[in-house]
């Protein structure tokens, strides 16, 4: 055979030998790359932590869009110093401690939060529910969250004095007592500086306005930052 013919056959033979090898190299590289991407994705997800807010209309941004409410503002505020935390707002207008207690187990299972913020009880008080029931439900909520591995922050509520001094003071003390008994963090009254200012309350006389939301956040944020700094 001539030299060019031999060279052509040699190139074809080399191509046949190298093609499977090249295929395996490329395939291995793709698999390795995909596995690395999967590991990085899982690592990123593992580093993400949830803050669950379980509340009523105050946290559900009643009378405004959700992104105007204090919970959404909390999420934005935390992005700078705590970007690994995502805020899950599970608040529903009209919610009571009993309703929150029914929903909490599924929420804990789904979101596996590192922190649970409980903002419930106002509707219990406004409806005149027994204080023993309020305390029992708040305790169960805090214990469920704590036993799941989450740190608990309780946002205390206040009710108008026309419910009577005994009921009003007992209502206020319920939040303090439950926080102490369950080793939860008791935040300041979230409507401090808001509830007594008519310009910051909607026409219904109960719910805070859009302008009040930064003030609510300012009342809550120190307690949240304190807990996050310890995690």
Image (cartoon, rainbow, N blue to C red):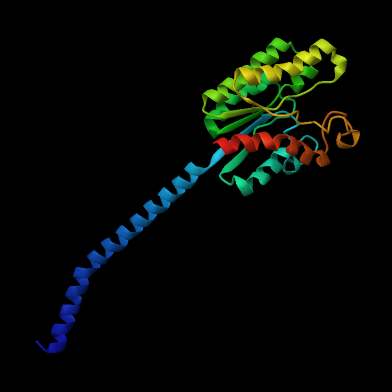
Horizontal and vertical percent position of residue 34:
39, 54
Name the residue rendered at 56%, 22% in the picture: 144
Name the residue rendered at 61%, 24% in the picture: 184
Front residue of 49/95: it is: 49
> In which quadrant is the C terminus drawn?
top right
- In the displayed structure, does residue 159 sit left or right of residue 221? right
Front residue of 25/12: it is: 25
Name the residue rendered at 62%, 39% in the picture: 87
Locate residue 4: give its quadrant: bottom left
Front residue of 195/112: it is: 195
Horizontal and vertical percent position of residue 61:
75, 36
Q: Residue furthest left?
A: 1
Locate residue 111: give its quadrant: top right
Q: Give the answer, above or below, for where 22 lies relative to 225.
A: below
Horizontal and vertical percent position of residue 3:
13, 88
- In the displayed structure, does residue 10 sit left or right of residue 109? left
Q: Is residue 224 visible?
A: yes
Name the residue rendered at 56%, 35% in the picture: 230
> In which quadrant is the N terminus drawn?
bottom left
Locate residue 121: give its quadrant: top right
């Amino acid at each position: 055979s001539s030299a060019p013919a031999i060279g052509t056959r040699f190139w074809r033979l080399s191509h046949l030998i190298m093609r499977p090898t090249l295929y395996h190299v490329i395939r291995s590289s793709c698999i390795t790359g995909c596995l690395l991407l999967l590991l990085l994705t899982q690592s990123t997800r593992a580093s993400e932590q949830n803050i669950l807010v379980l509340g009523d209309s105050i946290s559900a941004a009643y009378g405004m869009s959700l992104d105007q409410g204090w919970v959404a503002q909390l999420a934005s505020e935390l992005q700078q110093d705590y970007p690994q935390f995502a805020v899950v707002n599970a608040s529903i207008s009209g919610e009571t401690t009993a309703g929150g207690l029914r929903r909490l187990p599924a929420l804990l299972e789904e979101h596996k939060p590192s922190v649970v913020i409980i903002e419930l009880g106002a509707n219990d008080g406004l409806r005149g529910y027994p204080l023993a029931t309020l305390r029992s439900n708040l305790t169960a909520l805090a214990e469920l969250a704590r036993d799941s591995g989450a740190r608990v922050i309780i946002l205390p509520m206040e009710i108008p004095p026309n419910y009577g001094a005994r009921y009003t003071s007992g209502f206020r003390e319920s939040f303090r007592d439950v926080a102490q008994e369950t080793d939860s963090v008791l935040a300041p009254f979230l409507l401090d500086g808001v509830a007594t200012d008519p310009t910051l309350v909607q026409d219904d006389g109960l719910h805070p306005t859009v302008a009040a939301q930064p003030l609510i956040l300012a009342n809550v944020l120190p307690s949240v930052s304190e807990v996050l700094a310890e995690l």
